[in-house]
Image (spheres, grey):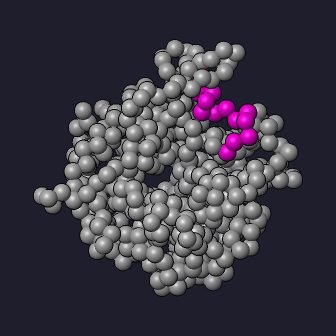
Amino acid sequence: MRFPEKFVWGAAAASYQVEGGFNADGRGLSVWDMFAHRPGSVHNGDTGDVATDHYHRYKEDVGLMRDIGLQAYRLSLSWSRILPDGVGYLNEPGLEFYDRLIDELLANNIQPYVTLYHWDFPLQLYYRGGWLNRDSSDWFAEYAQIVVRALGDRVRFWMTMNEPSVFTVLGHLSGIHAPGDRLGAAEGFRIAHHVLMAHGKASQVIRALRPDAQISMAGNGTVGIPATRSEADIAAARKHMFDTTEPSLWNLNWWSDPAMFGHYPAEGLKAVESMMPAGFEKDMEIIHQPYNYFGLNCYWGDEVSAGVDGKVDSVPKYSGHPITAFHWPVTPDALYWGPKFLYERYKLPVLITENGLSNSDWVSLDGKVHDPQRIDHMARYLGAFSRAYQDGVEVAGYLHWSIMDNFEWAEGMKHRFGLIHVDYRDGKRTLKDSAHWYKEVIRSNGESLP
């Protein structure tokens, strides 16, 4: 078998990227509303005000998910749609939207996988210090409790955070993403610590209200691909993935070790201890809320080899190597080695929570959307993930990014990741060739893969 019998096939999206309805029915603003309306922040001045209008067209979208044969849909919730100020007043119409969406998914035999936070921090809480404020973990726990009380009877699979390294570094250190801050490294590690506390408190809330809940983060980070199958190169690739000796927030284990083991990576802590919040050690019991599965967002990896004196050497890419429309390298083996190294370290089933490519898609003269590059890309990456399973990695599922073309953060509407093409002029949806191809992959549980 290419994949286990209970392997879950699905797709993913995020609230600000697809919902629109930015001020509908009492929704409060998020940092992405602020950032997107700041001149020069987003390509072409695009915003998520309308996005793909999923807020009003969710029944149509769920119908298309059913037509593709999805077994799971990973969605995120807009914190400020539910709590306009981030805490306090509950906006019932906002919560009811997600109540209806989840019912619609279940009515179509699609399992909801819910992400509590996918980067759209409530603007009113940002004015109170945002993730820099230690109270942010309590704000997040309050939000989680409201959500799980309302939806937890039907939602079993949860992700507390999406790619915390990205919203910490790109949002708060480099200013490329919302909220657009340019803080120092010490502030970055303070934010990271508070985010981990938020994960811990939210996990406690979820498990108290639904003891059988399955919890993770949707994590991302550096993935090492060995240049050869030699033990030395494999060790170098593993080190590349987990080495935190430099003060960087990009290594996935900086985020997952505290949740899984109750402590930061020891060698990494030596490098950054002076930048950590005072008394951080006392918070580790809260942070230590292990995952039930490992959610991995993975698009590419770095090919490396063993250097002298234990160093890791980067292998230069050859001229003309394959890249996506986003100029991301095409490295299918990332979906072999990433899951393999994670499974070795954490002994958890691996769920691919995001994988896909940006492509130059348009509606052809025949009214169809032909995207052979996406089909080839998916086949290569799924083939690598299947090999990881054959070699003993416990694999839980694959959630393609994304279900439909959408607002791609600072890149606006420029990049198309979807299985479904969206005409942003009128919102018309068109299943791409990749969606029809994926339907057969799902039906055959991967047996149709080349």
Residue 217 sits inside the magenta stretch: no
Q: Residue at x 34, y 49 (%)?
A: 359
Q: Quadrant of residue 83?
A: bottom right
Tell me the residue at 18%/57% (across/down). Answer: 364
**Relative depth, front residue between 5 and 232:** 232
- Identify which residue, 354 or 344, lies in the foreground: 354
Relative to 161, is 257 above or below?
A: above
Residue 117: image x %, image y %? 57, 62
Residue 97, percent from left and from top: 44, 77
Image position of 284 (left or right of 416): right
In the image, taking residue 14 as reference, residue 147 lies left or right, namely right
Residue 358 in view of the camera: yes
In the image shown, does 100 or 156 lie closer to the viewer? 100
Count all numbered tags in the image, as a single digit: 0
Q: Where is the C terminus found, in terms of image quarters?
A: top left
Q: Residue at x 54, y 35 (%)?
A: 223
Which residue sits at x=37%, y=73%?
53
Of 273 and 93, the residue lying toward us: 273
Q: Position of residue 304 (x, y in %)?
A: 54, 25
Give the image location of residue 57, x and y in percent. 33, 74
- Left-right relation of 331 to 264: left
Instruction: Pick out the residue farthest to the left.
Output: 366
Q: Quadrant of the N terminus?
A: top left
> Quick check: 151 above or below 216?
below
Span of residues in magenta: 235-249
Does the segment drawn in magenta span residue 241?
yes
Look at the image and tell me whether residue 343 can be seen: no
